[in-house]
Amino acid sequence: MIITNARIVTWEKPNRILDDHAVRINHSIIEDIGRTEEIISKYKDEEVIDAKGQILMPGLICAHTHFYGTFSRGLYIPGDAPADFPEILKKLWWPLDQSLNADDIKISAQICMIDAIKHGTTTLFDHHASPNHILGSLDLIEDAFTQSGVRGVVCYEVTDRGGEKKAREGIDENIRMINKLDRSKGLVKATFGMHASLTLSEETLAQSRKVLPDRYGVHIHVAEHQVDEYDSLSKSGDRIIQRLKRHDLLGKNSIVVHGVHLDISEINLLAQTNTWMTHQPRSNMNNAVGLGDIDSILRTGVKVCLGNDGFSNAMWDEWRTCYLVHKDWTLDPRKMNGNNVVEMAVYNNSDMATQFFDDVRIGRIEKGAKADLILVDYDPITDFTVDNLPWQILFGIRDSMVTTTVVDGKVLMRDRVILNLDEKMIAKEARKLSKDVWARYSQQFK
């Protein structure tokens, strides 16, 4: 397949914008890039997608999300509104994840896949929880990824809040999926999920480390709220990152999520161990937990990525929120330069996805990279250059401008029509299942 007549944003380092160019895709890989007339003459009798001057760029990447939260949309929380993040967990997320069965898990993931395809997000790192349906839950999400054609990394959230048996089941589900997908060359990979320090005992951390293969790390929430740090100090004598370091759970294969209330010693440990960190500003705002000093954390060398924590998979919305909220939070318009947003959302996300998918480049348009691509119908009214591209995206481009989505060389959406999923049927089934989920959720408050 060749995509012709495109204005290509390569997101290489240094980035390039190539006018009237084309790419040749061979199976799942970008095999060639050149002027449109050159590529057409070189590769005859191939399927052609005419970009008609649209922008061709790598698909967007979400470094942390929760598909299982799909049915929270429009959900009424009984009683008084939660007063802080611990109450949000107890009144919303923990009763909701306990309300999910197998059908709910699968349809929740499918809804998120549709959302991702429509908004140009082609790789997602999911963090799953369903305490009453643990074993086999990751297979359901893997199936949703495979059927949709979207690329992703799965894990199960190990926690002690359901007791020792369920903690053990969570550990087993992670290890089972890691072993299943360890050498897979497909669209789905696995890692080892954990909820947060505040719901993990010393014994569970030790047991997890004992069974975790050497080439794998953990995907865990850290210091989203102050209570997480105080809990860690109370039960272990360590702050969270020191606690994870003592259990040998940091490193280049581990992802820590949020990090709002880390201190400088913890941030330096993340940098020293090459641990990934993800930032989710929309979620931080919604939960009123504050904002980490991301500009400073980036300067220490921590590899900060951008996720959405279960918000919509319209990742450019996350970019805009990130760009704006740090200015408001600090009362300083110099905070969170657009290039820092790009550093997280493009370059660090690309590096993390590439590492998790066997070091085959994801998130760039270059020879040998995975063909995860989107076409964007954006006609700029000012000069469109490498230097001003971050602000063209932040103030001009919208996710609704994505017209075509390609993952692994396969077209998943063309001219805004999703090709391999029945969007209306899935939405209809979701509406039906959500009623039962909400009923089970509400029953826990009686």
Image (tube, rainbow, N blue to C red):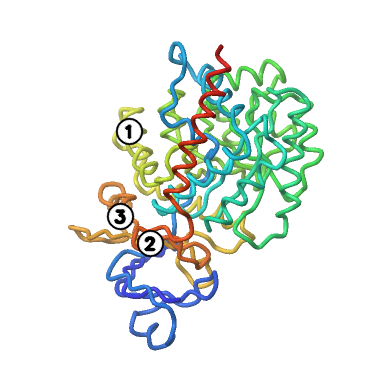
Q: CA distance from mark 1 to mark 3?
A: 27 Å
Q: Residue at x 77, y 37 (%)?
A: 209
Q: Kindly identify the amino acid type of the residue bearing the numbered disc 2.
A: Thr
Q: Residue at x 50, y 20 (%)?
A: 88
Label 1 Cα crowd, 10 Å radius (few <14 / some 14-19 / many 20+):
some
Q: Which residue, given by chain and number where applicable, does mark 1 sit on?
A: 327
Name the N-terminal-most of marks 1 and 2: 1
For residue 404, the mark is 2
Q: Which residue, given by chain and number where applicable, does mark 3 sit on?
A: 401
Image x and y of residue 283, in percent? 45, 32
Q: Is residue 5 visible?
A: yes
Image x and y of residue 315, in percent? 41, 46
- Image position of 160 (left or right of 50): right
Q: Kindly identify the amino acid type of the residue bearing the numbered disc 3.
A: Met
Q: Kindly identify the amino acid type of the residue bearing the numbered disc 1.
A: Lys
Position of residue 374 relative to residue 180, above or below, is below
Mark 1 touching mark 3, by CB under 8 A? Answer: no
Label 2 Cα crowd, 10 Å radius (few <14 / some 14-19 / many 20+):
many
Image x and y of residue 131, in percent? 66, 30
Q: Residue at x 39, y 41 (%)?
A: 318
Image x and y of residue 291, in percent? 44, 29
Identify the secondary structure beneath mark 2.
strand
